[in-house]
Structures are given as C-alpha cells and as structure tokens.
Image (spheres, rainbow, N blue to C red):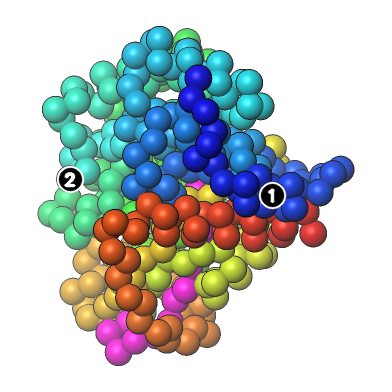
Amino acid sequence: MLRRTFVSLSGAALAQAATPQGSSAKVKPGIDLFSIRSSGWTPFQYLDYAAGLGAKVVHFSEIRFIGSLDEDNLRKVRAHAEKLGIEVEIGMRSICPSSSAFDPKQGTAEEQLNRMFTAANQVGSKIVRAFVGTRADRAGTLPIEGHIANAVKVLRNVRSQCLDHNLKIAIENHAGDMQGRELKMLIEEAGKDFVGACLDSGNPLWAIEDPHLTLETLAPYVLTSHIRDTAVWPVAEGAAVQWVRMGDGNIGINDYVRKYAEKCAGRALSMEIIVTQPIVFPYHDPAFWRGYRNTPAWEFSRFLSLVDAGKQRPTMPAVPKEQAAQREREDLEASMKYTLNLLNA
C-alpha cells in the first residue's frame, strides 16, 4: 500500500475545518479526478488525496484515472476505497458512434459499455458515466438530434446487460453537446429505468443555457454530478464564458449548490474544477445558430440575463506546463473548501 506522504497536512486540515461535527449536508461531497488530470497518480494516490480533502465519493470519470480495467487492479482499488470510507464511481468517454469524440479503436459502443458494466461491479460502482459528444457535434452535417438518436440506439442495445449488472448509466451534458431538454429526451427515449444524468454545472454555458434551467430540467433524472463555477459576460461577438474556481463566477453557484442539495438529495456533489481562458460564443453571427435552431427564445433569454449581468474579467496568464499539476490541486482544494463550507452553513 502506498504511503500518503504526498498528501499535504494542509489538505487534512482543510477537511477538518470545512466539515463540522454533526454536519447534516444532504449530498455526498465528491471529487471528479479530471480536476487533477495532470497529476498522473495511481488510483490509490488519488483516493488518499481525496480522503484528505474530505471527499466521500471519488469519480473516476475516465479509465486512465483508475489505471486499468484489470480485475485484480479494480478489486484492490475497491478495497482501498472501502478502507477510506469512500464510494467509487467509474466512467468512460463517448458512446455515440457518430460523434467525433467516439473512439472506434476501443470496440463498438456496446462492447465498450459491457466492459464497463463488468468493471463497475468489480470496483463497487453503482453507475457508469458516459457522454454523447462535444459542442462540435452541434455544428456538423448531422444535427445533434441525429447523434442523440444514435446514442439512444446503443443504450437500448445494452439495456438487459445493464440491468443484469444492477447498474445505471449516467449520461453527462458534456462540453456543450446537449442542452438540458435534449438530455432529458435522450434519457426518456432510452429508458429512465436504467439511464439517468451526470449533471455538469459548467457545460450548460457552453450550450448557451442557464445552468439553473439545466438543473430544473434534469433534477428528477440525476444520478451523479460534476460541479464548477463559471464567469460569463458580454462581448461584441456575443458572450465570453470562462470556467473558474468555486465562488469566483457570476452564475449564482451558491444558489445552484443549495438547489442541487434539495432536489438531488443523496447524490454525489463532485467537484470537477477546470479553470480556463474565456471562450467566445458568437451568437450575433447568424451562422452560429445552425447548431441551435431548436432552442426556444425563452430559454435563450435566461442565458442572456446571466451574460448581461456579467463584467469583463482581466486576462489570466497561461499556466506553464510544469506548474499545471500544482495549480490544478490548488484550484481544487480552494473549491472543495468553499463548497464544504457552503454545504455546512
């Protein structure tokens, strides 16, 4: 078993300070390991580090974070997590064969999902997280509805195997691929008896959607989550969107977390902290709307309200590659402390 010397004392102190005795938080604080994607640790190091920050759930959102799907590795990860009192969730990437994000070298979507079902049972995960695509899939020759239909077909093909493994598939609103109403349609068409949502709070802004609307739409279907804050403001082309640490944005993240705790009680509230440079969404350009023709005006107006209330942020210097891992941990630790204090307020 690996020693925990890499876990800073400040991390343990953070967890103790931010988690008062007798806390009655309704959700399980967690960490999506994509938050610290540059660390390159073993799954056991990730688990030890997360425990030091007060996490009750560790979300291995991609296979690379858990090392391998080898049964011996998974059973060791499960034993280590259980020793730490941590619940494990595992995930994969795209299950949509028509998405540019899908990797056919790993087999068919059905084959990939079936491997994950076996792995989930071995590591003790109750879900398998997956996604359809990215915002690039909204702008191609096939409309997003076509990609959704292809993903639904895959999901229906593995329904019996998923239920046989006593699992559910958590589809994420990923990288601006789907708005809340579209993911709801996917879940209901595939079958909500075995498909639900991995609700991401940052990705709706990449789909020109108010994240509070996404939460309202998908709350009944939520199986797990990715949580981060976002700053948004008007620019000449349309809107600038920048992912930031928890508490540094202007989308009302405090109210979002409180509403999530009420509407999704018992689910994981997992930090996926990604601090980025701003991305511009040029909605003043008519060509931009090719991928959003079915967006109702009343929904877009909610997004505009967030944009119009924002103010331009100063340009951040790029983080040198050699400092990326440390900066990611600093961003996560600050965000975890902020969120635990919010949950326990």
Kindly report the distance in space between the C-alpha atoms of the residues bearing marks 2 and 1.
Answer: 43 Å
Question: Is residue 309 at least partly visible in the picture?
Answer: yes
Report which residue position mark 2 lands on.
100
The mark found on residue 13 in the picture is 1
Residue 286 drawn at (x, y percent): 21, 78
| Magenta-span inclusion, residue 233 | yes
Q: Residue at x 13, y 54 (%)?
A: 141
Q: Residue extending furthest right?
A: 22
Q: Mark 1: which amino acid?
A: Ala
Instruction: Locate residue 248: give its quadrant.
Output: bottom right
Q: Main secondary structure of the magenta part?
A: strand
Task: Answer above or below: position of 212 versus 149.
Answer: below
The mark found on residue 175 in the picture is none
| Magenta-span inclusion, residue 77 | no
Question: Is residue 208 at least partly visible in the picture?
Answer: no
Chain part drawn in magenta: 222-238
Q: Mark 2: which amino acid?
A: Ser
- Identify the mark nearer the N-term, 2 or 1: 1
